[in-house]
Amino acid sequence: MHGSNHVARKIDLRGLLERLSAGQEALALLAELTDEQLDTVPPAGTFRFCDGHRTIVLVVSGALKHQGHQIDAIRAALR
């Protein structure tokens, strides 16, 4: 799936530590959320985009495609 470049002998320690640090910083934002804020996130399977199979790229591209259809419909109605 990821190709043959992801093997232990090709891991750059400095790059790995930088990536882990960046991930830690990004996840630290979650620690700042209150329980009430976390409870507002829909559980997996209750929202059509949170099906556990779609990547963020697929979700965003699907949302943009949907918005594009909405804009096209508005333009058509205004003609």
Image (tube, rainbow, N blue to C red):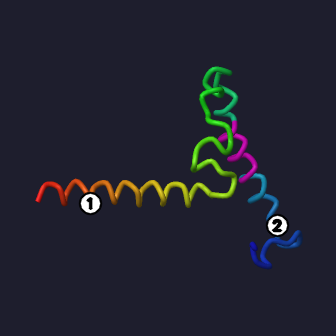
The image quarter containing residue 65 is bottom left
In the rendered image, residue 47, in percent from the top left (x then y), is placed at: 59, 43
Q: Which residue is mark 2?
A: 11
Task: Give percent across and percent down for residue 12.
Answer: 80, 65
Q: Residue furthest left?
A: 79
Residue nearest the observer in this picture, 49 or 35: 49
Magenta segment boundaries in residue numbering: 19-27
Q: Please name whichever residue, 29 or 73, is drawn nearer the observer in this view of the structure.
A: 73
SS assignment for the magenta stretch, majority: helix
Q: Residue at x 31, y 54 (%)?
A: 70
Q: Amino acid at mark 2?
A: Ile
Image quarter hosting the N terminus: bottom right
Pointer 1 or 2: first along the chain? 2
Q: Residue at x 25, y 57 (%)?
A: 73
> Measured along the vertical axis of the image, is residue 44 above or below residue 70?
above
In the picture shown, does residue 56 fall above or below 12? above
Quarter location, residue 77: bottom left
* Residue 64: % across, % down: 41, 57
Task: Tell me the tag on residue 60.
Answer: none
Neighbours of disc 2 within 10 Å: few (<14), some (14-19), many (20+):
few
Residue 72: numbered disc: 1
Which one is in front, 62 or 7?
A: 62
